[in-house]
Image: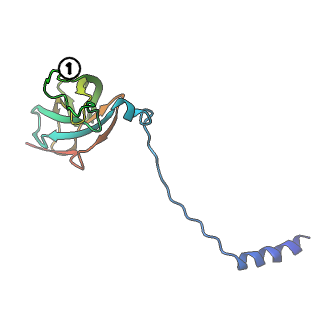
């Protein structure tokens, strides 16, 4: 019977064509992304600079955090001024962060972690500043700020290199 099956398989192979398409994808979802909108936990993160430094001299790096899609009062008040309805003061959330850098090219000049306060309203802004010292000349990868317990997106757009000279 083995001789009988072989011609049948050859006939099927000639009469039909199959196409296989492979598309590799990677999904990266935060565990809090599903309920983040209910908690106003969307934050845009952007490196403000500086983007040049001198070897051996401390440089204070600055990141801006901005609340995106936060809350607005029912009456449309943005809460920036006190109009007698109690909306003048803005509640804030403490967001823990840490800064990571390649230890072979950066020397930390301050604590690498902390907590920053960011308001719940859309457009609320906060900054994180941290001192680092470059120990090598050239184009170095910028230390990175990581936020904890919030869904965030880095909006730096390719400006993740600092140029270090003598």
Please report the residue visible at 76 percent of the width from the left and 75 percent of the height from the top. Answer: 12
Q: Give the residue pinned by disc 1.
A: 86
Label 1 Cα neighbours within 10 Å, binned few <14 / some 14-19 / many ≥20 = few
Residue 96 in which image quadrant: top left
Q: How many marks?
A: 1
Circle 1 SS class: loop
In front here: 18 or 76?
A: 76
Residue 75 in which image quadrant: top left
Quarter of the rendering occupied by the N terminus:
bottom right
Please report the residue visible at 14 percent of the width from the left and 40 percent of the height from the top. Answer: 49
Q: Residue furthest right?
A: 1
Please report the residue visible at 24 percent of the width from the left and 27 percent of the height from the top. Answer: 118
Q: Is residue 61 left or right of residue 147?
A: left
Whether 87 is drawn above or below 160: the answer is: above
Where is residue 24 shown, x and y percent of the image? Answer: 49, 56
In front here: 69 or 2?
A: 69
Residue 116 in which image quadrant: top left
Where is residue 54 shown, x and y percent of the image? Answer: 9, 39
In front here: 54 or 49?
A: 49
Whether 154 is drawn above or below 40: the answer is: below
Where is residue 160 shown, x and y percent of the image? Answer: 23, 45
Please report the residue visible at 23 percent of the width from the left and 24 percent of the height from the top. Answer: 117
Where is residue 20 shown, x and y percent of the image? Answer: 59, 66
In front here: 45 or 91?
A: 91
């Amino acid at each position: 019977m083995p001789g009988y099956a072989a011609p049948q398989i050859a006939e099927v192979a000639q009469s039909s064509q199959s196409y296989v398409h492979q598309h590799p994808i990677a999904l990266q979802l935060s565990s809090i992304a599903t309920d983040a909108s209910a908690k106003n936990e969307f934050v845009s993160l952007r490196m403000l600079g500086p983007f040049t430094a001198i070897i051996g001299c401390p440089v204070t790096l600055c990141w801006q955090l901005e609340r995106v899609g936060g809350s607005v009062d029912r009456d449309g008040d943005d809460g920036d001024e006190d109009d007698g309805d109690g909306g003048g003061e803005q509640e804030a959330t403490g967001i823990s962060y840490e800064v990571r850098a390649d230890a072979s090219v950066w020397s930390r000049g301050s604590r690498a972690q902390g907590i920053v306060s960011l308001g719940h309203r859309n457009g609320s802004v906060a900054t994180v500043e941290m001192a680092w010292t470059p120990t090598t000349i050239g184009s170095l990868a910028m230390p990175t700020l990581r936020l904890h317990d919030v869904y965030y997106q880095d909006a730096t757009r390719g400006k993740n290199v600092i140029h270090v000279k003598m």
